Image (cartoon, grey):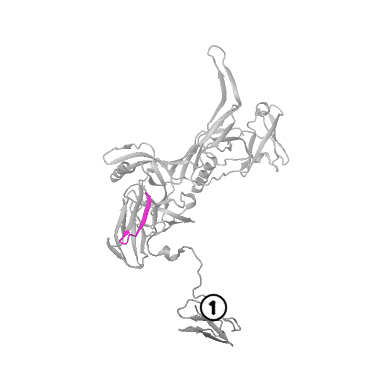
Amino acid sequence: MATLIGVAGLSVLHLSGHFTVSANLQTVRLAGVPSVVGLDRAGSRIFTWPGVLPRAGLTGAADRSFRDDWYHRIHVRPAAIDFGNLVSAVSHPVEVWNAFLSPVSLNAIEGTGADGVSLSGQPAAPLVYGGLTSRVYTVAASTQGSPVLSARYVWRFSNGASSTLTVTGRRVVVFGLAPNWASGVTERLAWLTDVLESYDGSEQRIRLRSVPRRSFEFQLDLAGHDGRVLETRLHAWAARVFAVPVWTDRTVLTAPLRAGATAVGVSDVANADYRAGGLVAFWSDNQHHEVGEILSLAGNALTLKQPLSRGWPAGTRVFPARFARLDGDVVVAHPTDALASARVRFEVEDPSVVPAIDAGTAYRGYRVLEWRPNRIEDLTDTWRRKLATLDYGTGPVTIDDLSGHPVVGKRLRFTFSNRATIQAFRAWLHARQGRAVPFWLSSGQSDVAVTRQINAADQHLTVRNLGYARYLASPSIQRDVAIRVAGGSAYLRRITGATEISEDEELLTIDAPLGLAIPLSRIGRVSFLSLVRLEADAQELFWETDGIVQAVLDVRTVQE
């Protein structure tokens, strides 16, 4: 215990040993004595404090810091590599950092599932890592190996520390055998629609696929070594996924590409099957080709995810590519010992999404098909009715017309020779969704012969008597017409009534006047409009060349 006496402003400490007195005489600190002695301001009191102050009981835990997260461990950066779809040899750097403050020794690197994967760049174990020192390895994967790439590397050190790298991906073999264009290429788009038909013939259509299934079929005629390559592919990879160039979407390099390039300039990207995350194929011949993965698109420029492994000269053919499987049996014919011929069909694995653009004039809630069919062959119509037949075999046959109107089927053939028009037609097919979405179709015939001038305020057409008032005025069919005038303009109107004027003429009432006077000489053709849908969910585009397409549409009329 220490005692402090204050007399007339002078403080005296009765304790031997070293001590310190503050200037204002408020505190005294004694060397080696854990006590605090205090004075009042007047300095006339004597008071005593204990030499050891009592301590409160405290509990807690040490908080982690940045030091604990980064040091005293082994880091592998990155810890996981996903090569994605492996269509060519790829590599990636990996840094292994010793975050201990002192050197450690690498005992071994354990690799599992490393089929077709290699790790290089540093000497083999045992290997000393200095304190806070890193070493860079290179992980390389080739197209040779199992279809699914799943490798795991573990670095094990002498102090018990370890760290792991995982490598994943999927190997894809390029099917670089080009089709024989003499037989063309058939592209098939298949939707799926559930059509529920009622007693009177009206329908409820339910779309079951939002994206169509897509396939390509073409003829292979190969000679010599190419025939052996085909058989090798069929032996080893026929049940697996190929990277198949979209042969119909050819472009040509206008400038050479060096090995290691990641930027590729191509033409007409908007009308070809390029997409971010998709593939691009560089093709010189059946033996020299390379496929890269597209990271992004900007205008007519592609950025690749991995650099090219080789250079490509100007004039090299470039195609988008798709993941696809061989569908069904492949029959290979050998006309001679040096020739091979086969018809192959590839089902595309990844979804082929095309923006559904419903082109054409809108009329009464549906679009009007404005492409005119090719008249190189006769346009044929098939008329059928929904009839119920009661026949006991011994008496009269009873027929019941269930719907009261015919179903008319038509076959339309189109020829497109412009890439933009082909792409627009494909977008129109996607808007149809197979059998799901109807559209208006003009008969393309001069069905109604107008006999008098049409005035601006007229809400009727005077036409040659075709029996409309007698036979068609009451049923809800053949009520819509397209009135075409000189210059190509078309006016779409609904017939709301008909009156027979004479044996030669009748009057058709329309729902709205045309708004302008049209002399008889300027009236081109008046055709009936029918609301129709596609007869089948699957539609085919036959590519005669990579710029000419033939398409055949079978349609049938439906009730509005």
Is 515 within the magenta? no
On the image, the x and y values in percent for residue 359 come to 57, 44
Which residue reaches farthest top? 394
Mark 1 = which residue? 48
Residue 530, position in %: x, y? 60, 34
Any magenta on residue 165?
Answer: yes
Q: Which residue lies furthest to the right in this view?
A: 457
Instruction: Give the amino acid at mark 1.
Output: Thr
Q: Is residue 184 visible?
A: no
Which one is in front, 450 or 46?
46
Is label 1 in a helix, a strand or a loop? loop
Residue at 47% in and 78% down: 33
Q: Main secondary structure of the magenta part?
A: strand
Q: Where is residue 497 in the image (x, y as percent from the top left)?
A: 70, 32
Magenta part of the chain: 156-170
Question: Measuring 62% from the left and 45% from the top, which residue is drawn there?
Answer: 487
Point 45% across, 52% down: residue: 277
